[in-house]
Image: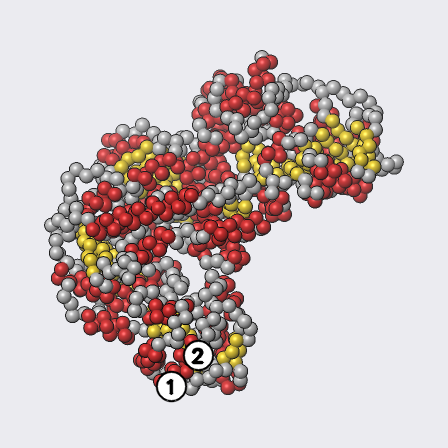
Amino acid sequence: MSELNELAYWMALAHAAVNTSVKNDVLIKCFKEKKSVVDFFSMSTQDWNSVFGMNLADVDALSRAKEQLANNAFAVENLLSQGFVLIPSTSPEFPQLLKDNLKKNGCPVLLYAKGNIGLLNQPSVAVVGARSASEISLDFTRKISSKLAKEGKVVVSGFAKGVDRVALDAAVSVEGKSVIVLPQGISTFASGFKQYYKQIIEGKVLVVSAYAPKVPWSTRLAMDRNRFIYGLASEIYVAESNEGGGTWSGVMNGLKRGCKIYVRKPDDGEKNANRILIEKGCSPISLGGENVIEYPIAVPQMQAVCEEKAVYNAEKKEPKKRKSRKKKEATLDLFEAEDNQT
Amino acid sequence: MLKRQEAECRLKEIFGFDHFYDDQWSVIEKVFNKERVLVIQKTGFGKSLCYQFPATQFNGLTIVFSPLIALMRDQVTSLNNKGIAAQCINSNQTQEKNDAVIEQAKKGELKILYIAPERQGSVSWQEAVRQMKISMVVVDEAHCISQWGHDFRPDFRRIVDLVKILPVDIPVLAVTATATQRVQDDIQEQIGNGMSVIRGNLLRENLRLFVVKVKSENEKKIRIAEYLKNCEGSGLIYTGTRVNTAVYADWLNYVGIKAAMYNGSLEAETRVDIERGLQENRWKAIVSTNALGMGVDKPDIRFIIHTQMPQSPIHYYQEIGRAGRDGLPADIILFYNENRDDAGESFDEKLPLSFINNAKPKIPEYEAVVEALKNEPLGERGVMEKLNMKQTPVRTILADLVEQKIIFKNDGGKYEYKYDAPELKTESFEKLRLAKLEDLNAMIGYVNTTEPRMDYLRKYLGDKIDIPSSNCDNTNLKGFLDNSLHSDLWTNLKTFKNERFPELVPKKTSSLDIGYALDNYIQEAGEIGQILHHCKYENGGDFPDELVARMARMVQKKLSAQHFDMLLYVPPTISGDLVKNFAEKLTVRIGVPLSHDLKKMRLTEAQKIPQNAILKRSNVKDAFGFASPEILVGKNILLLDDIYDSGATMNEIAKMLKKNGAETVTPIVIAKTVGGDL
Ligand SMILES: Nc1ncnc2c1ncn2[C@@H]1O[C@H](COP(=O)(O)OP(=O)(O)OP(=O)(O)O)[C@@H](O)[C@H]1O
Ligand SMILES: [Mg+2]
């Protein structure tokens, strides 16, 4: 079955009002039974209940999502005609790192993107920090971001004011590569697409969103999408964090996962939480000219806690051959770990 | 599932018909079965019922993509008369009406909604369709999907994609009356997903087919007039060019046959009025380009005449298809000028050949558009202005680039270059051109065939022929039109040509008064347009005195009621002093004093250079001045030029003259183009 013909179904699954883990369970089960999302939605609600062990509320929510299939088709066609790309989580284009990091409970089922989606599977770093960061932090951001971009790393950021925007523009100014992770639906970003038109068509900037295309910006989503920023990066650089803010909770999450997190070493008397993060196990760094000076960590980093099965932690057995790989194989790659474990 | 008997009870109740035709029922069964079907059945077969009936049985809404507003309107009216909740959304309706229809559809109050494919690109439609409950999708005139057909429309590309994405349980029905095997295969391949085909035969028994070979363009005019004097009912005359719609309509009216012209350059209001007039039999004949066609749903069109052979038998079959929908006889006449020029090229093949060979713009133009879009997103108009190009090639290029996924159109209507876009592939252009040349040869084959003409057309369309048909000049109707051979209209034609001075009717906002042209800009041997072209663009020397004499006669005939104080001429760009010299000779003959005081204040380009109206206007804006403006007060002025195209130059001059107090400014020119055929 052609992938095009599945996209409306992926949308239905992605935006159904059920927990992410339920959606991913559906995918895992479908994979095991060699079924597609189309097959899943063609099943009866009884089957959803008996085969998938779904509770009534979830069955109900998915039935409602199913009613939207034709409408989704119109939306998908409209998105594709405007050059957007839809990336289901079983696609080889889907960022492996995001699956590894967010796992069954957090990994989105579908991404919307515009630009060079190849960036999603390249070595990446997130440069993060508060919207209201100080000038020292912004200066650090500028320097670290352009340095990393020059080294060829993809700089992931969230297009928020302050650190995010500075990190992006610094990467762009040295012709580096960037991923913008939107806290809104992808079709609500017209002004941004205009602003980064050249970088996008040159393959330097990619814009992604995990939300329904028309969803407007909101503070809730601005908090929520931080997971994706952290999830898309193998290293995290924190310019400035306040206790309890979005940056903070993202870092805490990252630490739990065993992610390498660098924090700018604050000067004496700075009013922020950088020092506390260092005390919690992040690596303090500062910039001496072009060089990053890394200081010894204050406490040994805690071990990654395996609270849930690492369903998405597929083993990478062979280097990826993206284009030539068939879709079914990709699916296999995604769920093999689960198969091995059970 | 609904049984035929039960279904026919409901059919009777809702539509008033007793039975489905067998072919209709087999389609309807498939639709109820949620299948995807392509239906190829001749005009008037009853294709609409194949979706209209199921639509009344479904819970939700059936969306019908249809390329023609006129068609939508007719269908909606007839459905509403049967009490079926149907509406359409289109650009001819007011915003309020469209909004109201969308509201109805969202509330689930509609069964059938007709929309144009380009509506898919509208933000408000996309917003609305998210909230509708959709039961079926229909593609009317589905041949528009295929570039191998006679009426490929790039907007249908999106419909193809949509159908591919639609969930499996939404039935899709595509219908057309004209599809060759190749077009059928193309549609099937594009839509994919096991679309089945139901094809009926395309025989139209009541059409009487004739080909009339003539020796000149004049002979066509004579024989058409003779035919119309004697025939019953009303019908259509198709000319190959816009300019000939004007010439033929004028000629017929001149000999007392009521005719109206119709072409794409007319304003929407005028077009609607003519369409209505056709329904009301206001004229004996409408003379039209193929802009009028698919939309015409008049049951009793009694004749369809072509003054020029179309590009292919499929074009021809489609254009004649509108005749005799009531099943009564209709005459179908194709005129063919056997004359060949010195190079041995057939006169009547030139026009279709040039259509085919110029269908695609030059490759560097494609590249220029791509480069411009790499720089910034631009709309169609933006591209025209940036690159000084005409609308038609820009449209073609943008559509091809979208088709090849090199660019796409964003929500704001601007075209963007795509990251990682493929290279432009041009082999397909050449393949298409060669295929069209083959089609043209098949059309020439129709002119020369000795077999039953309907069979020739049907074979071309992929129809199987069991019994040879008749009803044409190769069979039982030999010599039927010969009575138009001898005519006393030849002298009329001569005076017509001598005395026909096309009116220059400036736009309402123009500063010009009504004026006249010696002729239309017709590029045929011996015509004024060709003489002009030769002098102006091929260094052919001064315009001949014969034209001066003719212009004097025109002023005397058309403008003798007015008094003129002075004769001015449009200052030259490249054509040197041609117009000035002409004016110097003309002033003597008409006795209106000549003034040389109209001057260009800055350099402008020849108006042939700016390729579109927007740039033409800005090219001449504030470009003219008058040496001693005070003398203009209260003056009536004759303003002379060679060609009147968009009228931008003469309008700009008139504006300046009137600002300085001139009373009237009457334009006179040698040739007037029709709809930008310069
Ligand atoms: N089963 C039927 N019984 C009687 N009349 C019918 C039946 N089906 C259709 N008709 C009538 O036939 C006429 C032509 O139908 P319709 O407009 O659908 O033709 P069409 O195939 O769409 O032709 P076109 O190619 O010109 O669009 C209509 O007046 C319609 O009401
Ligand atoms: Mg029809």
Q: Is residue B277 visible?
A: no
**Pointer 2: what residue?**
B580
Residue B182, percent across and down? 32, 39
Judged from this view, the residue extending furthest toward the top is A342
Where the C terminus of chain B falls, by quadrant? Answer: bottom left
Badge 1 amino acid: Val
Q: Is residue A129 above or below residue B347?
A: above
How packed mark 2 is, by other alpha carbons closer than 10 Å (few <14, some 14-19, many 20 or more), is: many
Whether marks 2 and 1 lie on the same chain: yes
Residue at 36% from the left image edge and 38% from the top image edge: B187
User: In front: B426, or B10?
Assistant: B426
Looking at the image, which residue is at 43% across and 32% down?
A: B167
Residue B406 location (% of width, % of height):
51, 44
Locate residue B555 relative to residue A126 in the image: left or right: left
> Residue A141's quadrant in the figure?
top right
Please say whether residue B539 is visible from this viewpoint.
yes
Q: Quadrant of the N terminus of chain B?
A: top left
Q: Amino acid at mark 2?
A: Lys
Q: Earlier in the sequence, mark 2 or mark 1?
A: 2
Q: Callout 1 environment at 10 Å: few (<14), some (14 to 19), or many (20+)?
A: few
Residue B614 appears left or right of B351? right
Against B157, is B508 above or below?
below
Chain under numbered label 1:
B
Q: Position of residue A98 (x, y in %)?
A: 63, 28
Residue B492, image x, y percentages: 21, 72
Question: How far is mark 2 from mark 1, CA to CA?
Answer: 13 Å
Q: Nearer the viewer, residue A165 or B269?
A: A165
Q: Which residue is mark 1?
A: B588
What is the secondary structure assignment of the residue under circle 2? helix
Residue drawn at 22 percent across, 55 percent down: B334
